Amino acid sequence: MRIRIVRKRRSDAAVPGSASGPPGDDYRPLSGRRRLLILLLAVATAITVVLTLLDPPGGVVRKRPPAPPVPECSASAAAAGEAGCVGGKASVILSTPPAASR
């Protein structure tokens, strides 16, 4: 024995998006308030992303070690090239390239 269930079909006019329905039912433009809401949400999201990138929440704050003190040197010591003086000359060792062989 088979049981057959029959449903009543809706007419095409009652189905949204059907071709036989009244024109213009498929698309409704956004209202001014809805556009303003979307714009405000977009701006708020952009500001939140930028602020989070600039200052991440819960970031670890590390203390920097103090800078080493700069030695006091006279102008004559810097000109003479003493080591450790700001503006002094550094000795550089240059090596010559090996001779090209034929």
Image: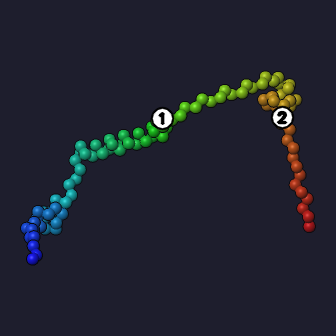
The nearer-to-camera label among 2 and 1 is 1
Residue shown at 51% from the left, 35% from the top: 59
Residue 94 visible in rendering: yes
Characterize the local packing of mark 2: few (<14), some (14-19) or many (20 or more) Cα atoms within 10 angstroms.
some
Query: What is the secondary structure assignment of the residue under circle 1?
Result: loop
Say which residue label 2 marks: 89
Q: Name the amino acid, label 1.
A: Gly
Query: Circle 1 sits on which residue?
Result: 58
> Residue at the spot x=75%, y=26% of the render?
70
Colouring mode (rainbow / by chain / secondary structure / one colour): rainbow
Residue positioned 58% across, 32% down in the render: 62
Q: Which mark is residue 29?
A: none
Quadrant assignment, res 83: top right
Q: Which one is nearer the viewer's eye here, 95 or 7?
A: 7
Q: Is residue 24 visible?
A: no
Image location of residue 77, percent across then percent down: 85, 26
Q: Is residue 65 left or right of residue 19?
A: right
